[in-house]
Image (cartoon, rainbow, N blue to C red):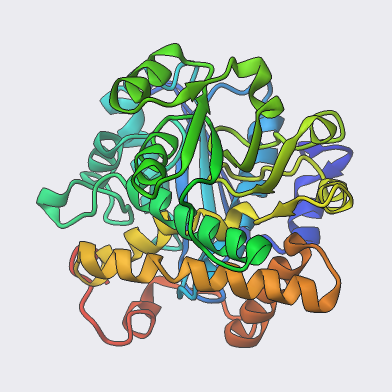
Amino acid sequence: MPSVRGRTVTELMARHGHEQVVFASDAKAGLRAVIAIHSTALGPSLGGVRFRRYDRDVDALADALRLSEAMSLKASLAGLHQGGGKAVVQWDDPDRPRPEALLDALGRAVDDLGGRYLAAEDVGATTADMDALARVTPWVTGVDARVGGSGDPSPVTAFGVLCAMRAAVAELDGEPSLQGRTVHVVGVGHVGAPLVDLLVDAGAIVSVSDVFPGRVEAVVARHPVAVHAPDRALDAACDVLAPCALGGLLDEVTIPRLRCRAIVGAANNQLASDRAADQLADRGMLFVPDFVASAGGIVNIAEEFVGYDRAHALERTAGIEQTTARVLRAARERGVTPQCAAETLARDRIAHEGGGRRWQPGDAAAWTNGAPLTRLRP
């Protein structure tokens, strides 16, 4: 049995509460994937499909386990009746289109789970990928609006991050306005780029960095933002640092370099270790947990199941500001880090409302409170 840091897969699953891990492969189609289901206590597990090159298969497994758990916490705090899952697929170049045969094979692997896992977009994935999966399985979200989906959830994720920033600024200074605040966005891809648009509209003074020059050029063409070299991104002096690229950015090496007052971004698993949250607190930096700030995407795609309405999705996403404020208030009152407060609040809801249940496909009517599933079969 494969192991991660000396622990077997089942040991890690038991330790972190995972229900199921599926390894999927199809040599002819070129598929090598891991699908991790963390919790279905509140509803079917939802999480993105990540296309990424991993040096070792065990690294893909570790990513799937870590990200699926974060999705459970994200869905719980967002008030959704969903759990957390994640699919990671070995793929050497995220910008290279996936062949139809690979997506068909992945779709079959998702379909075999009978709705316990709902696929969505993540790093490297596109709406076209979701559309391809939807030709094989109904258990997929983020499909094109022309077939009843919501399309790319990234702009709504960006809006949620903006709402979380407002709560962070209010916690620091007593009022939520971003007017005149300096914000540095690390990574201007699917979420970072629309976040820049929103920040500029809100009157913030924005700077950006990205390892892909073309992305920076596209943002600069729209807005007169400052640009920092990727290797100097964490040295930018700002009110708010917004990590919107890959996770693991904040560790014992990078945290001492930070020159910000708050960290609010969309990247998953920004903390490289549990100790990182304490290190940020020791430096007096306010950290909004990524699974709180980036919940807009899953709030958005949750609307697909009963008929997508963009205005309603944005209205629900705006609630991230109140959720963030509740987490920060709980951290302050309990004398713990926001990361600890957010995890406690999320796990308490899973335990109290979930009651140890595991979702099955036949539970669809109860899951939607009787509303029709407009795209998904029962």
Left or right, 334 with reference to 208: right
Q: Is residue 304 above or below residue 104?
A: below
Q: How many marks?
A: 0
Considering depth in this image, is 164 or 12 the residue closer to the camera?
A: 164
**Displayed quadrant of residue 135:** top left
In the rendered image, residue 320, in percent from the top left (x then y), is placed at 48, 66
The outermost residue toward the left is 146
User: Residue shown at 86%/72% (left/top)?
Assistant: 335
Considering depth in this image, is 50 or 343 the residue closer to the camera?
A: 343
In the rendered image, residue 237, in percent from the top left (x then y), is placed at 67, 32
Which image quarter is the C terminus in?
A: bottom left
Which image quarter is the N terminus in?
A: top right
Q: Is residue 6 visible?
A: yes
Q: Is residue 292 above or below residue 372?
A: above
Q: Is residue 53 above or below residue 305?
A: above
Q: Is residue 38 visible?
A: no
In the rendered image, residue 77, in percent from the top left (x then y), is placed at 57, 71
Left or right, 336 with reference to 146: right
User: Residue shown at 44%/71% (left/top)?
Assistant: 319
User: Residue shown at 36%/28% (left/top)?
Assistant: 102
Left or right, 247 with reference to 155: right
Considering depth in this image, is 41 or 345 the residue closer to the camera?
A: 345
The outermost residue toward the front is 180
In the rendered image, residue 136, in percent from the top left (x then y), is placed at 25, 45
